[in-house]
Image: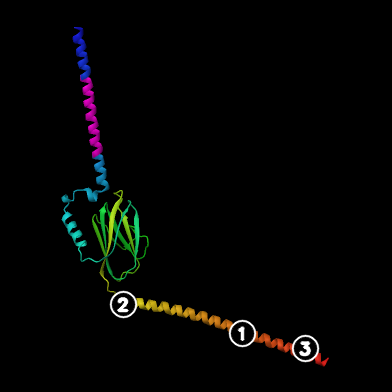
């Protein structure tokens, strides 16, 4: 009887131990699954543009066509800049070349927007002249008549921890209109004329200063000679 009770007690202890181990294992599995889900969700929020299945987007094919066109071998790019930007921040560039250019901003990760101004060196999202703010590829075409220099601002969208982007500058047409060429030459001629005028003015001032100093020296010499003659006559007469 005692042996039977002892065996039952041992069996109950073993059963309780196994149940505890199984419960702890299942709990740890649930926690690991929750952490994995949270991590995947965080990564998706941080990199929504690249990690979301684009095959479920209606614009996926259109975007792929745009990228194929952008990277076509006949495109003439003079600059390509890859960088990253933190949320609600700006990165600035200055562009001086004359001609017709296309600025293309590709958000490789996150979302970056393109702003351009000719008046404000540090462009903001509420102080600009031209902008392209989409969730994909941003483009702006700049004609040769737009005043140079051009100030470019890249803005990182606030919903992403870090946005990775690529800025491409394409030369569309290097032709400069005649009126712009004439204006540029006129400005150069005016600048050269101003420099020549300033140089001539300085030369005239130096010449006049030398002339005045020379006349004063001659007057001083004549006055000394006259005084010497007077002293000589006084000595002779006395």
Q: Is residue 32 magenta?
A: yes
Labels 3 & 1 near each other (Cβ < 8 A): no
Q: Main secondary structure of the magenta part?
A: helix
Q: Which residue is at the front of the view, 185 or 124?
A: 185
- Callout 3 secondary element: helix
- Residue 236 x, y percent position in the rendering: 81, 92
Residue 120 lies left or right of residue 211; in this view the side is left
Q: In what element is the residue under mark 1?
A: helix
Badge 3: few (under 14), some or many (20 or more) residues near its Cα, within 10 Å? few
Indicate left or right for 223 with 233 as reference: left
Query: Quarter of the image holding residue 235?
Result: bottom right
- Which residue is labeled 1 in the image? 214
> Any mark on residue 20, and which?
none
Q: Residue at x 45, y 80 (%)?
A: 196
The correct choice, above or below, for 25 with respect to 95 in the image is: above
How far is mark 3 from mark 2, CA to CA? 77 Å
Task: Pinpoint residue 90: horizontal percent, then vertical percent.
Answer: 34, 56
Q: Residues within 10 Å of mark 2 (few under 14, many from 20)?
A: few
Closer to viewer: mark 3 or mark 2: 3
Check residue 179 in the rendering and tell me which mark sits there, or answer none.
2
The residue positioned 32% from the left and 77% from the top of the image is: 181
Disc nearest the viewer among 2 and 1:
1
Q: Which residues are magenta?
A: 15-36
Going from N to C along the chain, the mark reached first, 2 or 1, is: 2
Tell me the quarter of the image containing the C terminus. Answer: bottom right
Furthest residue in direction bottom, as rendered? 237
The residue wearing badge 3 is 231
Q: Earlier in the sequence, mark 3 or mark 2?
A: 2
Image point 26% across, 55% down: which residue? 107
In this orientation, does residue 179 appear?
Answer: yes
């Amino acid at each position: 009887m005692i042996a039977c009770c002892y065996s039952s007690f041992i069996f109950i202890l073993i059963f309780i131990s196994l149940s505890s181990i199984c419960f702890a294992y299942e709990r740890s599995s649930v926690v690991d699954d929750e952490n994995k889900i949270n991590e995947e969700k965080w990564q998706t929020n941080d990199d929504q543009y690249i990690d979301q299945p684009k095959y479920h987007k209606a614009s996926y094919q259109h975007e792929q066509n745009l990228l194929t066109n952008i990277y076509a071998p006949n495109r003439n790019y003079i600059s390509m800049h890859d960088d990253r930007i933190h949320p609600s921040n700006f990165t600035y560039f200055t562009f001086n070349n004359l001609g017709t250019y296309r600025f293309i901003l590709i958000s490789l990760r996150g979302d970056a927007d393109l702003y351009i101004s000719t008046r404000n060196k540090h462009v903001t999202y509420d102080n600009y002249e031209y902008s392209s703010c989409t969730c994909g590829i941003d483009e702006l075409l700049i004609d040769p008549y737009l005043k140079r220099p051009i100030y470019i601002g890249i803005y990182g969208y606030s919903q992403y921890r870090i946005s990775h982007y690529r800025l491409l500058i394409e030369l569309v047409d290097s032709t400069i209109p005649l009126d712009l060429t004439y204006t540029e030459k006129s400005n150069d001629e005016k600048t050269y004329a101003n420099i020549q005028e300033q140089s001539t003015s300085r030369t005239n001032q130096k010449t006049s200063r030398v002339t005045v100093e020379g006349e004063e020296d001659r007057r001083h010499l004549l006055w000394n000679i006259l005084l010497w003659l007077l002293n000589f006559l006084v000595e002779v007469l006395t």
